[in-house]
């Protein structure tokens, strides 16, 4: 008898639409692999819904707060429903960018310098000399990220407005020129390295990530072999240092600009990487010889408690 998989999707975060797309793609693929699938749009009644459903496995296709920060993982532990991706601690840790950097740095992974500041303070005066990047501490998919360009006279005023809904504290880091790289990890192996280029504009923002044709993926990334291998090593080390399980994806910057620093740093680890038709991990898996169906099957069979 085939396993009954509850695909958790949607939710209430700013990344709801991405989660709906990821969840649909994964649910369709799992049905193609012969699983019995129930699609569950996650709301406040999720505990009672899952208690009634009694699935064998929960496939977590949520993104952002509640789905990616240890919250749903803790609920699944209480309900004793095996689930995919990382557990409570790794999810919460990776979602907090500053705490994750502390752990990765201790494991020998190079990360950007930076500091936490109050958002209103960051709106009043430049917290770092431009260029620099302002990030919400606990959001994904480039939600709320602001790049303050060199020569900009005023700090971003949106940080002091009611429009800012991403918390009172923000992470400020120096802007690192060069290439945007990303590398997935599947279990205990690093997948291929992709260089991501925005098709329009000059950085890989939310629209570039998720709009069809919004970005160009170069796989394998055109890097010197030792740099390519180093990206894979850093991605695997970061995954293991944070305690991640299943599939994760590290995002990195590499400054190989003329006269640049040569710096290669891990920006963050995404414990719930996107699984849409434009997503990176499925592309990396395909490059490694795994179909999308085989990838999601592996994730379901890898599911467990106490992750």
Image (cartoon, helix red, strand yellow):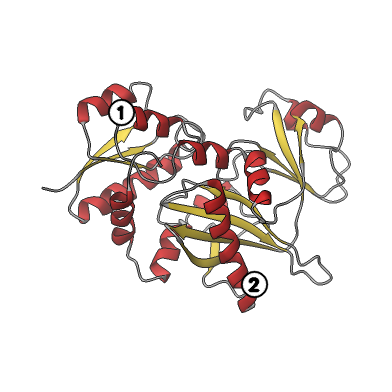
Relative to 149, residue 216 above or below: below
Relative to 242, residue 13 above or below: above
Task: Please tell me which residue is depicted at 60% across the width and 75% down the height of the picture.
Answer: 222
Q: Looking at the picture, tell me which residue is in the foreground, 215 or 304.
A: 304
Q: Looking at the picture, tell me which residue is in the foreground, 7 or 186.
A: 186
Label 2's element? helix
* Residue 227 badge: 2
Give coordinates of residue 90: x percent, y percent: 51, 41
* Residue 249 badge: none
Which residue, given by chain and number where applicable, does mark 1 sit on? 79
Q: Residues within 10 Å of mark 2 (few under 14, many from 20)?
A: few
Give coordinates of residue 121: x percent, y percent: 81, 28
Instruction: Decide if residue 298 is on the left or right side of residue 93.
Output: left
Of the two numbered discs 2 and 1 in the rendering, the one whose residue sits closer to the viewer: 1
Instruction: Decide if residue 135 is on the left or right side of residue 16.
Output: right
Judge whether residue 198 can be spotted in this image: no
Relative to 187, residue 122 above or below: above
Give coordinates of residue 158: x percent, y percent: 73, 31
Instruction: Decide if residue 98 is on the left or right side of residue 44.
Output: right
Q: Residues within 10 Å of mark 1 (few under 14, many from 20)?
A: some
Judge whether residue 268 can be spotted in this image: yes
């Amino acid at each position: 008898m085939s396993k009954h998989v509850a695909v958790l999707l949607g939710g209430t975060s700013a990344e709801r639409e991405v989660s709906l797309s990821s969840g649909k793609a994964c649910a369709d693929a799992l049905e193609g692999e012969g699983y019995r699938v129930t699609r569950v749009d996650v709301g406040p009644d999720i505990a009672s819904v899952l208690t009634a459903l009694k699935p064998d496995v929960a496939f977590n296709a949520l993104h952002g707060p509640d789905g990616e920060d240890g919250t749903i993982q803790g609920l699944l532990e209480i309900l004793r429903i095996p689930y995919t991706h990382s557990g409570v601690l790794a999810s919460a840790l990776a979602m907090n960018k500053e705490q994750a950097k502390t752990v990765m740095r201790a494991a020998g992974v190079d990360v950007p310098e930076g500091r936490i500041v109050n958002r209103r303070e960051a709106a009043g005066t430049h917290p770092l000399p431009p260029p620099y990047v302002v990030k919400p501490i606990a959001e994904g998919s480039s939600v709320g990220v602001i790049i303050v360009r060199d020569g900009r006279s005023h700090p971003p005023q949106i940080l002091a407005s009611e429009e800012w809904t991403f918390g009172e504290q923000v992470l400020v880091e120096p802007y690192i020129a060069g290439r945007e790289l990303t590398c997935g990890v599947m279990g205990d192996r690093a997948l291929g390295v992709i260089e991501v280029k925005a098709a329009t504009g000059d950085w890989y923002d939310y629209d570039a990530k998720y709009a069809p044709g919004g970005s160009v993926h170069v796989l394998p990334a055109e890097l010197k072999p030792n740099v390519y291998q180093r990206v894979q090593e850093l991605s695997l080390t970061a995954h293991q240092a944070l305690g991640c399980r299943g599939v994760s994806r590290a995002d990195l910057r590499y400054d190989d600009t003329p006269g640049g620093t040569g710096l290669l740093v891990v920006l963050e680890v995404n414990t719930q990487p996107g699984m849409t038709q434009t997503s990176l991990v499925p592309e990396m898996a395909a490059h490694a010889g795994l179909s999308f169906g085989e990838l999601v099957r592996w994730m379901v069979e890898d599911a467990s408690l106490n992750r």
